[in-house]
Image: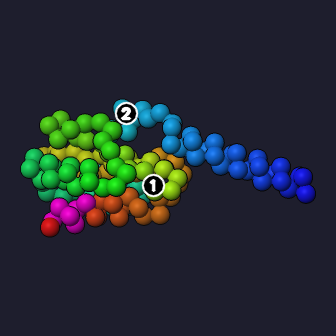
Amino acid sequence: MRLILAGVLVLAVACLAFSAYVRLAPTDVAAWTVLPDDPQAGDGPGSATRIVDGDARTFARLDKIARATPRTRVLAGSTQAGMITYVTRSAVMGFPDYTTVALRDGKLILYARLRFGHSDMGVNALRLDSWLAALRN
């Protein structure tokens, strides 16, 4: 019985340590404030990319939509700089997803990806699609 209790305790401490790491790990801003070299619209493992027509006004509207998303904050950038990276954290564990939005040659490029793990279960694509739906309304 003591062995089982010890195992449960070790597992609980490991889960708490991982949870703390996920929430407190430092972010290398330069590593996450980027776009793919040749962005293509679509979904990948743990990521999603959308490309739509846009201008500075559209970018500013999208920025307001992104900032209003629960658990989302700006990591770096601005609409004036032409690129912003947002961090959106999951509700329970606080897993960070990074979304970079840039205005390039009359196109808004939205690139969302996870930081930890291999699968985001489609949440990055859903977030981008919801932002674009709100932009159309």
Element under disc 1: loop
Left or right: residue 47 compared with residue 49: right
The region drawn magenta spans 131-136
Name which quarter of the figure residue 17 lies in: top right
User: Where 11 sits versus 122, above or below?
Assistant: above
Residue for point 65% across, 49% down? 15
Image quarter where the N terminus lies is bottom right
Residue 91 in percent (x, y) is at 46, 56
Residue 104 in percent (x, y) is at 17, 45
Residue for point 14% across, 57% down? 53
Element under disc 2: helix
For disc 2, the neighbor class at 10 Å (few under 14, some 14 to 19, many from 20) is few
Residue 78 visible, this angle: yes
In front: mark 1 or mark 2? 1
Left or right: residue 116 compared with residue 11: left
Mark closer to the chain start, 1 or 2: 2
Label total for image:
2
Find out whether residue 68 is within the magenta segment.
no
Residue for point 56% across, 40% down? 21
Q: Which mark is residue 90?
A: 1
Q: Which mark is residue 29?
A: 2
Residue 61 in percent (x, y) is at 15, 53
**Which amino acid type is marked by label 1?**
Ser
What colour-coding does the image apply?
rainbow
| Alpha carbons under labels 1 and 2: distance apart | 19 Å
**Which amino acid type is marked by label 2?**
Val
Residue for point 47% across, 63% down? 121
